[in-house]
């Protein structure tokens, strides 16, 4: 049985990220949410593009207003009004000013904006009642960003903020990595779909749903291969077909050592190389990871129990899927935070143990609230609302309430 961190590095080493030349699509910005940027982005323009005002007020020469006060105001002649989007026509000379609005271009000759709240308008003149700071309320050209310097790196997921920047850069279409294709197979004679009536001994295939949604949430394309009975030939045919059209293939069930657990045999027969058989993790000990070198598909044989399947997905598949998807290296790894456990956390010490519950922010940092009820790997009922998995390390049997625990964030 491999320790968890070794299994993690074996898996990550098996994954080749999508190719930034070949595996891309050009998408409209409005449909780019959640996609991974495939190219470095910079702009030919400075931000701001030109010196502009950060306030509604008056554009002045600082030297004209450096000694004013309500008792001793300075009167300036207004030579122009400059709304946003308008190019100033005149040059500010000493004794002159321009009425200016937020975002409007600074007129040549002016270097400071006096906000209108400390002025008094008198026809075509204005009294300046307070001395501003030199250059106050001017947003200088290039002060936010200088043209042709790196702006966005490849590998970042695009959300409202990055898409706003790309829009401002006038990039209406943008290269992103294609979505990884992830196949999902449920194995088991006992499984039925949620629509089918349940006969004695049968069980609904919840894993298909859990994994399909977890994969889709990561922006990958889900290809569902449905329920496959524990019959060697059918399972073999399904896997042989699925590996040709997927980047990752996830199956659940059939990877224990029971009489109906054929997955590893089939993978070997199909020419895949098996890199992992089992991991010292609870839940989730049986985990098969195999690589089909011809098809380039990475196979994850996940355990059948619903919690084991999801925990294995979060701990092992999710980081690998991020790497495959082109996500930058700093963001592949699972995110662990330190939290104060509100309950005793127990393990038999023989495997790294993941206990599910809620990660909340308390007064002094994170707190972990253990889910109430059975922590059997077959119990999906108390998984609802899970936002964290608390880790009891190998060889430890108890993390007492009130003590610190590492918690894997679930998003
Ligand atoms: P297995 O690894 O095939 O022996 O399955 C272990 C346990 O997980 C059994 O109790 C199965 O009934 C259950 N199980 C297997 N596949 C699924 C599934 N797709 N959805 C829900 N439970 C499952
Ligand atoms: Mg089974």
Image (cartoon, rainbow, N blue to C red):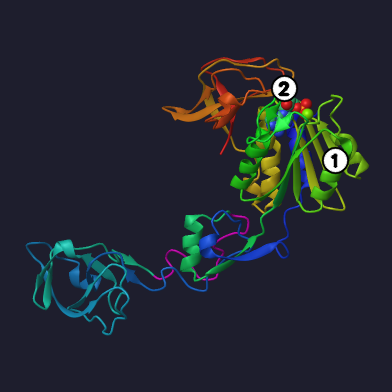
Q: Quadrant of residue 130?
A: bottom left
Split into 4 quadrants, where in the image is the C terminus?
top right
| Label at residue 201 | 2
Q: Quadrant of residue 179?
A: bottom right
Relative vertical location of residue 111 with respect to residue 393 in this rendering, above or below: below
Q: Nearer the viewer, residue 292 or 340?
A: 292
Can residue 204 be spotted in the picture?
yes
* Crowd class of label 2 (few under 14; some 14 to 19; many from 20; radius 10 Å): few
Q: How many marks?
A: 2
Q: Nearer the viewer, residue 323 or 403?
A: 323
Ligand 2's quadrant: top right
Mark 1 lies on a secondary structure that is helix
The location of residue 232, given as percent across then percent down, is: 88, 36
Magenta segment: 141-156
Q: Residue at x 11, y 78 (%)?
A: 124
Left or right position of 124 against 308: left
The location of residue 197, given as percent across then percent down, is: 65, 30
Residue tagged by mark 1?
A: 234
Q: Quadrant of residue 208?
A: top right
* Crowd class of label 1 (few under 14; some 14 to 19; many from 20; radius 10 Å): few
Q: Nearer the viewer, residue 154 or 211?
A: 211
Left or right position of 311 against 56: right
**Mark 2 to mark 1 CA distance (whole Å):** 22 Å
């Amino acid at each position: 049985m491999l320790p968890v961190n070794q299994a993690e590095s074996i898996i990550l080493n098996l994954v080749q990220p999508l190719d930034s030349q070949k595996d891309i699509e050009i998408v409209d910005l409005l449909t780019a949410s959640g996609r991974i940027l495939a190219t470095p982005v910079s702009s030919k323009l400075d931000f701001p593009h030109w010196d502009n005002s950060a306030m509604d007020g008056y554009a002045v020469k600082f030297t004209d207003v450096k000694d004013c006060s309500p008792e001793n105001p300075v009167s300036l002649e207004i030579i122009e009004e400059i709304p946003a989007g308008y190019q100033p026509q005149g040059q500010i000379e000493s004794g002159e000013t321009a009425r200016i609005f937020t975002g409007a271009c600074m007129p040549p000759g002016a270097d400071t904006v006096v906000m209108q709240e400390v002025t008094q308008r008198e026809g075509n003149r204005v009294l300046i009642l307070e001395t501003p700071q030199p250059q106050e309320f001017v947003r200088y050209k290039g002060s936010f960003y200088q043209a042709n310097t790196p702006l966005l790196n490849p590998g970042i997921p695009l959300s409202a903020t990055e898409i706003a920047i790309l829009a401002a850069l006038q990039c209406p279409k943008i290269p992103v990595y294609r979505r990884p294709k992830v196949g999902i197979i449920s194995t088991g004679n006992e499984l039925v779909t949620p629509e089918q009536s349940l006969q004695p001994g049968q069980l609904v295939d919840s894993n298909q749903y859990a994994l399909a949604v977890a994969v889709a949430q990561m922006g990958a394309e889900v290809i569902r291969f449905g329920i496959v009975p524990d019959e060697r030939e059918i399972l073999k045919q399904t896997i042989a077909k699925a590996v040709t059209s997927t980047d990752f293939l996830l199956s659940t069930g059939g990877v224990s050592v029971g009489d109906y657990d054929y997955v590893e045999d089939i993978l070997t027969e199909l020419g895949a190389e098996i890199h992992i058989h089992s991991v010292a993790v609870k839940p989730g000990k049986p985990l098969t990871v195999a690589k089909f070198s011809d098809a380039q598909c990475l196979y994850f044989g996940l355990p059948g129990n619903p919690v084991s399947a999801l925990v294995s997905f979060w701990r092992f598949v999710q980081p690998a899927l991020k790497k495959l998807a082109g996500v930058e290296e700093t963001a592949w790894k699972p995110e662990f935070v330190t939290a104060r456990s509100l309950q005793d956390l127990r393990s038999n010490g023989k495997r790294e143990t993941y206990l599910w519950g809620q990660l909340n922010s308390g007064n002094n940092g994170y707190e972990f609230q253990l889910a109430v009820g059975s922590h059997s790997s077959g119990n999906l009922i108390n998984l609802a609302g899970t936002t964290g998995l608390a880790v009891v390390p190998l060889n430890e049997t108890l993390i007492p309430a009130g003590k610190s625990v590492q918690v894997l964030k679930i998003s």
